[in-house]
Amino acid sequence: MFRVAVTADLHYGPRHQDGADATLALAAELYANPPDLLLLAGDVGAGEDFDRCLGMFADLPCQKALVPGNHDIWVRPDDPRGDSLAVYRDYLPRVAAAHGFHYLDADPLVLPDVGLALVGSMNWYDYSWAADRIPVVADDWQDRLRTKRFTRGRHNDANFVRWEFDDPGFAREAVTTLGGHLRQVLRWVPAAVLVTHHPPFRGLNYPKNEPLDLDGLLWEAFSGNVGVEQLLAEFGDRVPLAFCGHTHYARAATFGATRGYNVGGDYHFKRLLRFDWPDGAVTATEFGTAGEQVA
């Protein structure tokens, strides 16, 4: 039995005290009942809170791995860490390593003793989930995608993600890297578990009622890409499980042979998923709200 715990969207920091208290409770549970592997699916903490949050888990007696989230790469113009790309490629991996976390965007984690590899990516969006529908409802759709402008306000990635890429360009790089990691590890072990921040397929995205209005279509455009879905179709049952965060909605869905789970923690409460590899059911415990539930 190999015990795995997964959480996401800790958003650690003093601005969200209820959530910080919930994260402390989640960490205490992990120390009391440590898994064999802990996975964090992004949005750990913006700025210096990324470091502070990981420090809470540094002494946990298990293997640890993570992918970052979009909030983790937010920067301001005078950020001493550099632009978002420098944070993603240099700062975050360095801080993760200092606290004993394997940075999955750079390298997969192979566990040959249990016949498993962990592959992961922050993942990104390229508008492909809604590109065919947005032009029908908005004449200025190209400008809205470029500026991330809703009918009210803008996506905060437009304000705080600063790098040389446009969204489709970074999404292509992320999917290419992830595909290379999958092909690499599946030569060595029979199966891989996928961990992303942005949802890997549409069934794990925000719940919604069709037909979508313009803002709903824009959120769909800014949530994921078809490239990861194509990878899951390519590798079939060799990727039996996928986990993500980002939306703050707990969801379970399937894509072909892959069972997927969106962790579903939010700013004021946190969720911890647990399962035993390879056959255990996925269960969820909430911190900051009452009760335990099966995902």
Image (spheres, grey):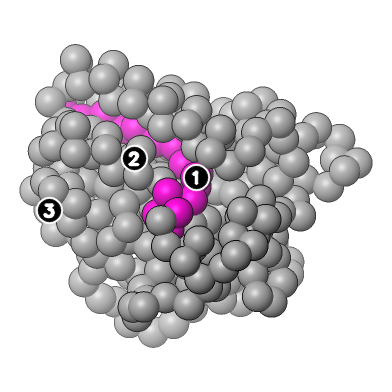
What kind of secondary structure does the magenta stretch mostly adopt?
loop
Determine whether, in the image, residue 41 is placed left or right of residue 46: left
Asked which secondary structure carries label 2, the reply is helix
Q: Nearer the viewer, residue 48 or 106?
A: 106
Name which quarter of the figure residue 220 lies in.
bottom left
How many numbered badges does the structure rendering display? 3
C-alpha distance separating marks 2 and 3: 25 Å
Residue ID at (70%, 46%)? 161
**Residue 241 at x, y percent in the picture:** 21, 46
The answer, for residue 132, to whether it is visible in the render is: yes
Q: Earlier in the sequence, mark 2 or mark 3?
A: 2
Q: What element does badge 1 sit on?
A: loop
Q: Which residue has dot 1 on it?
A: 126
> What are the residue bounds of the magenta stretch?
115-131
**What SS does tag 3 mark?**
loop
- The answer to whether residue 156 is magenta is no
The amino acid pointed to by label 2 is Val
Residue 150 is marked as none
Q: Amino acid at mark 3?
A: Gly
